[in-house]
Structures are given as C-alpha cells and as structure tokens.
Image: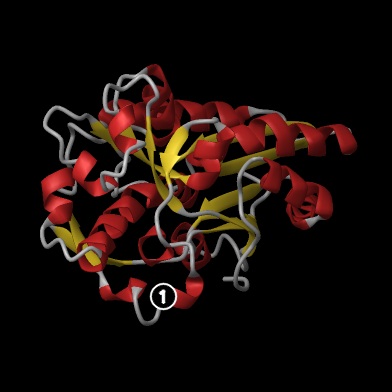
C-alpha cells in the first residue's frame, strides 16, 4: 500500500510540473488506460494541436490528491459518481457528465490451468472456490472497482442463493493476498501471475482478455436495478478508527472540468469531444457501453 501511494505521488508530481500552455491534463480511472492513452487522448491532441498528458490511477486516490492540492488536472474522469462527488463537495467541480458505461465481469488468464474450467458449464463462482486458484482485485479503500467486485459477490450471494460466498472467495475485504493496483491488475492476469480477477468489461475487452459475462442482477450495469435490487447490499470499511458504510453505484463513467484547471477552455473542449460521435466511437470500439443517466 505504501509503495502504491509513493508511486502515485511521484506520478502526480510529474503530472503537475508539466507546462500548461497547449497541454490538456487528464486524470482518469486506471481501468481506462487503453482507450485514453492510445485513442481518445492522442486523437484529441492531434485535432487540436495540443499536447495530451494522462494519468491513470484509482479514482478515489486521484480525487483525494486533487483535494489535497498534490495533483492538478484539467479534466477528471471517474467510474461511479462517488469520486466526482468528493470533488464537488470540496468545491473543485460543479458538474460531472456521463460519457460511457460498463459492467463487472470475471476475467481469467488463458495461461491458467483453470481456464478450461471457466469455459466449461461449471458455474464461475464454483470455479473461483477451487483450492490453489489465485484471484486478484483492487483496493476497496482507494478504487471503485475494488468496492464494486465486493458488491458483485454480495449480490451473487442473493442471486445464486449462496450465503457466505463473498467471504469464501474474497476472505477479508482488505485482503493483501488478493489486492493489486488497478493499472497492474490486468497486466498480472495477462502474464499468468494470477488466474482470475475482477474486471470492467470495457477494460477487459480493450486488452483482449477472456472473461465470464455476468447477469445484470450482479454486474452493476443497470441503473434501473439500483432502487429495488442493487441497493440491498452494503459493506463497511474501517480506517483510522472511522467506519464508512458503502452502497452500490451504477457503473457509469463521468467526466468533469476542474475549477482550477490550467487550461479550462481546452478542458471543456475535451469533455465535449468525449460526448461527440468520434469520442463515442472510440469508446464503443474499445468495449465501452453508451452513457447512462444524467449529470451528477
């Protein structure tokens, strides 16, 4: 955890020190690395004779760095409303608009000896309980995906009528044996260092990895299911003597312009580009769903 924080602060320092003129700085949820750094960022920069700089890390961690004035960015893109709402509460943004969506999946390595089991008729949640299988996920303290995979398992307990399923597979919510940084998680999976992992369908498709599609009842993709189904599960995180009760949020990506943006006009232009036909095509080509819901 300390090494991840040190790396994040080093990246933030580098990100903040760059020249602002003609530069668009975008802090984004770490799972978006492929679509941001290979497609959206470069395409926008070329069309606007600008320089694109992107930093992808856990969204809550990025939000807290910006609130603490340890990171300055023009645009912030988060998954789920939570990190954007932190910035709004701190007076750093006024509105975040939906630009794409995704769903939770279980990704698995084609190099794993368990790959055939995932491709068989055996339920995925039974395969994940196999002795010796290495499962990876991200930190629920700093990353929405780390929270969302826990919600997926809690919903799976109800949907498949399997009490205690989350505990059997995940162990403690803060389980160091399973937790990796978001940017490294799928790389570890692809390299065969772990057998299976949590994943957003968008990121897994962008990296051309194998995955198990999950039903809407547990994949958090359907905002219409929030009131009567998704909202039925909660869990708590305790840190520094303080306990927070977490609730589900739909898997929608939101983009916002920071009030302290060094280049606010270019920042607004970038958000508009994400919503444009060209931006939406880049999202779609990389496995993302359409924007859902309204601004937050």
Q: Is residue 3 left or right of residue 285?
A: left
Residue visible at 31% across and 57% down? 152
Q: Where does the image place residue 63, in percent across and percent down from the top left?
A: 47, 50
Location of residue 51 (image quadrant): top right
Look at the picture and state if 276 lies above or below 38.
below
- Residue 214 or 273: which is nearer the viewer? 214
Q: Where does the image place residue 230, in percent across and percent down from the top left?
A: 35, 71
Which residue is identified by label 1? Answer: 226
- Residue 9 or 109: which is nearer the viewer? 109
Mark 1, other Cα within 10 Å: few <14 / some 14–19 / many ≥20 = some
Location of residue 124 (image quadrant): top left
- Residue 211 or 250: which is nearer the viewer? 211
Residue 71 in sight here: no
Q: Is residue 45 left or right of residue 84?
A: right
Q: In this view, does 209 lie to the left or right of 158?
A: right
Q: Where does the image place residue 101, in percent across and percent down from the top left?
A: 57, 57
Image quarter hosting the N terminus = top left
Residue visible at 37% across and 66% down? 217
Image quarter hosting the C terminus = bottom right
Residue visible at 27% across and 30% down? 2
Residue 105 in sight here: yes
Secondary structure under badge 1? loop
Q: Where does the image place residue 137, in percent across and percent down from the top left?
A: 31, 39
What colour-coding does the image apply? secondary structure
């Amino acid at each position: 955890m300390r090494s991840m924080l040190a790396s994040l602060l080093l990246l933030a320092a580098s990100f903040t020190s760059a020249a602002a003129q003609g530069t668009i700085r975008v802090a984004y949820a770490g799972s978006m690395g492929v679509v941001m750094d290979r497609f959206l960022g470069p395409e926008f920069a070329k069309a606007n004779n600008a320089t694109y700089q992107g930093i992808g890390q856990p969204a809550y961690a990025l939000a807290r760095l910006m609130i603490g004035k340890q990171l300055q960015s023009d645009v912030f893109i988060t998954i789920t409303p939570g990190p954007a709402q932190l910035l709004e509460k701190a007076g750093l943004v006024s509105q975040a608009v939906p630009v794409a969506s995704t769903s939770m999946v279980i990704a698995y390595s084609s190099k794993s000896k368990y790959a055939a089991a995932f491709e068989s008729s055996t339920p995925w949640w039974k395969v994940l309980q196999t002795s010796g299988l290495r499962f990876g996920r991200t930190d629920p303290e700093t990353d929405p995906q780390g929270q969302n995979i826990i919600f997926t398992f809690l919903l799976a307990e109800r949907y498949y009528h399997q009490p205690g399923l989350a505990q059997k597979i995940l162990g403690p919510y803060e389980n160091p044996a399973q937790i990796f940084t978001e940017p490294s998680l799928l790389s570890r999976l692809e390299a065969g260092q772990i057998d299976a992992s949590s994943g957003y369908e968008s990121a897994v498709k962008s990296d051309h990895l194998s995955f198990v599609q999950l039903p809407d009842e547990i994949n958090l993709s359907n905002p219409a299911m929030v009131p009567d189904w998704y909202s039925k599960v909660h869990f708590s995180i305790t840190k520094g003597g303080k306990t927070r009760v977490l609730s589900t949020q739909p898997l929608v990506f939101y983009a916002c312009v920071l009030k302290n943006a060094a280049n606010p006009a270019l920042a607004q232009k970038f958000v508009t580009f994400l919503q444009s036909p060209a931006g939406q095509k880049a999202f779609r080509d990389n496995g993302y769903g359409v924007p859902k819901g309204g601004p937050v």
